[in-house]
Structures are given as structure tokens and as C-alpha cells.
Amino acid sequence: MRLKRQDLRKIIIETLLKEVADENLRGPRTVAPQTRPSVNPSNVPQEVEDKSGNLFSVSPAGDITFLGKRDQKIAKPITFEGDRKLKVASNLIDDQKSMGKNIPSGLKTIIKDTDYEIVDEDEYRFKIFPNGQMFLLSKSGKSINKEIIGQNRIKAAETLQRLFSDRRQRPYLFSISTNSSSLTSSGPDKKASPKKGIQYYPGYDGKILTNNIASIEPKKEKDMVVGACTAEGCAQFVRETLGPHVGNFVGNAWHAHGRFAKESAFNSLTTAQQAEAALIFSKINKNPKEKSLEGEVRNFIKKIIPDQSQFSDLALGDVVGLYYNPSDNFTKAFFEGATGRNAMGIEPAPAEGPFFLTPEGKKWNPDLLGQNIEFKPGNTLKKGKGFGMNTHIGFVGAILDGVPIIYHNVHHMVKATGLEAMNKNGLSIVWAGRLAKS
């Protein structure tokens, strides 16, 4: 009897199902190494490590999951979507290239042009580097290999950005200014100065200088709106924007100081300042309630705000602790920063502290909350290591002619403040740390 194709297919499927059922009843069996089915490598996610030792799983389909450190993986891996996945993929590609490693196929699925060679409509072939350098490699197959600088580079970048509206195809174009005429060459053998023009953090490119106010000067503006975000808090915004290689460890605005601050007004306090801080701490400990000592804490911090010019060399992606005068979290920030705990000293937190001792020399602990004790500065504070008192946090989202512009979240609005607009009655930088790739 001749079987029809559909009958033969039915018999094969039924046989396979029976074999699977029998296998489940028998339980797992040991397979000799020589007969073990081979796994197709193309279907297996690949573990990728960045320069900072962070570990990611990258599937061939382009799924990226953050696993933690190689020796300390997190309990709940984080999978990225949308623009965040593009940023992580771009960073991983950069790292793999700089470390001389092969780029996983899954990353090439997300960002196909990993060599960043672009051919325009007139058959000009360009190569673009992460630092913003641009080379014209050839024209219609004829080798040229010449660097493009000054106004020619600006024009070329404008053209390429129009051609490649999909961000996945042009990650390096973020670092090329197309907005400022100050990017010019000072001579035939000199490159454009990195101190001139505008640079943006990826994802926020082109937002500041699109403002229609003719007189706007971003370096001196204090309240520019450059975007919106879903994050409620300022620290969450920084965490979500910068990504897992730094963001998962930001915590809140004041505890971030202990983890990241390199330049800080809260370090190296004078003996008088330490004594004043101890007095403030004692008052809050006696009445440990949020907002109970706002004015006194605000005035103390205001007196130690440093000259903002010391932060003039910040780079894109640098995180900054901010004094924010309108804030009503000064009591909370000061006390939680000093204790290294959350919920006004009640709940533990992965932060440094406490920074104050009882008269008998014992470290502060939650059992002392509500007691009338005259605390004194601890050894850490005396040796020059301070704690975070800042209620706000942001990062360098743009640099205009060498001047940093700070991006920060205020109730879902991403605002920008130029360094030259910083003042003690509004927003000021109190500490900074170099966290992200610049």
C-alpha cells in the first residue's frame, strides 16, 4: 500500500511523540560522550565582558541581559529593551574592539555596521571613530584616505545624519558637532580643538541648541528643558540613563557620594565644620523626623559649596552630586548620609557610615535614635573622608566650548544647567566622579 505524504508525516509525528513520552517515563539516561547530541553554537547566548568587568549575555537574536560581575552575579538578571539596549550594545562593541576581541554576532544583529564605514548616495565611503575623527576612504572605489576636519567635517556629519536617521546605524555620529560654527581648523596641519563646539551624551543629541530663543546661551542657562523621562527620582534617572555598568550602584543621591565622589566639598572638612556637623547630627538624632531641620542643614551645606570653576574639566557622562536650594530633603539627606542607612536611620543600606561617635567613643547605631546625645566626629570624618549631604544628582549631558552642562531630573522633566549658571540660590555642584565612558 502506498502512503500519502500527509499520512507518512502523521506516522512520523506520532512516533516521535511516543518516544518522548517513553523517555520521560524512564527518566534521564546517561549519554556517552561520543553519542551526545552536539549543540549548535549559533543558537547559544554568548557571555560578553566589558572593560569594567561587568558580564552580559548576548543571544544571536540580539537579546542583551546584564548578569552582574563574573565573580558576583546578580539574582535577577536585567534584560534591556529599546534605546537602552542600543546604548549597551554600542558600549560593548567599543569595548570588544578596544580589547582586541571578536564582536559577537548578536551585537551585530543590533548594530549591523560595527566597522562604522558608511557609503553615502554619491558613493563616498567614510570611516568614523568614537573620538569623532572622520576619514574619507574612497570615492567610487578610488582610494583617498584623507581626514576630514573643520567645516567640511560638520557638513559631512550633517549629510550622514540625514541619511541614517536610524540611530542603530550611526552611533559614533553623536560625538560630531553639527550645531556650532566654532568647530574650525586653525591651520592646514591642525585638527579642530576639542574645546570648541558642542558634544552631547548619546540619546540627547541636538536638544539644547534647538531652542528658538535667539538669545539663549546654554553655558549660562539654568533651567533648560531637554527632554522627559519616566523616572520619578533624580537618582533613578541617572541609573537608567547611564546603564548597568555604573547605574545599578548609584543608590540615592546622598549615598552615591561614598561610592563615586572623587572631588568633593564634603571631604576634608575643617575642625569647626566637623563640630558643626556633629551638632546638627545630634539635633536630628534627638528628633529623627524628615524636614525637622531643613534650614540649618541647608545653610551648613551652602557655606561649603565650592568654587564651581573647579569642575570645569568634567567629561560627558560624569556624575555630579548637586546642592538644590528648593529641595525639602536636606534633613533626610544629611542624616541618612551620616548614618549610612535609609528611612532616617532605621533601615540598612549598602553605604558607608556611621560618621559620628557617642561621647564614650561608640559608633552611632539605630538603638540610639530619639536620645539626647552630644555626638562627636568619628575617625573617618577626622581623616578627611566625608559623607553625602546632597539632595540631588545629575550627570554631564553636554559640553559646549569646553563648558559642562548638567542634566538632571525634576519631576519627570530632564532639565539642563550650564556650569556658568550654577549659584548657591539655585543649583551647584558639590561633588563629581568619573563613571561613564566619555
Image (cartoon, rainbow, N blue to C red):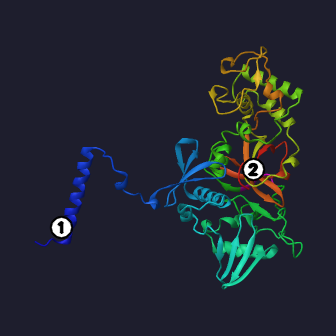
Mark 2 or 1, closer to the camera: 1
Q: Residue 93: where, in percent of width, then height?
A: 62, 60
Task: Tell me if residue 117 comes above or below residue 318 in the rendering.
Answer: below
Taking the spot 24% from the left edge, 55% from the top edge, the residue there is: 17
Find the magenta span and give its range.
Answer: 221-225
Which residue is labeled 2 in the image? Answer: 318
Image coords of residue 394 (percent x, y): 73, 47
Magenta stretch prevailing secondary structure: loop
Question: In the rendered view, would you say 152 is above or below 367?
Answer: below
Question: What label sits on residue 7 in the rendered view?
Answer: 1
- Residue type (three-letter) at the residue carrying disc 2: Asp
Left or right of 71 in this view: 437: right
The question of residue 60 being in magenta is answered with no
Q: Alpha-carbon neighbours of circle 2 within 10 Å: few (<14), some, or many (≥20)? A: many
Q: Quadrant of the N terminus?
A: bottom left
Under circle 1, the secondary element is helix
- Label number found at residue 386: none
Q: Position of residue 419 (x, y in %)?
A: 83, 51
From mark 2 to mark 1, how far is it between C-alphas?
A: 67 Å
The front one of 46 and 112 is 46
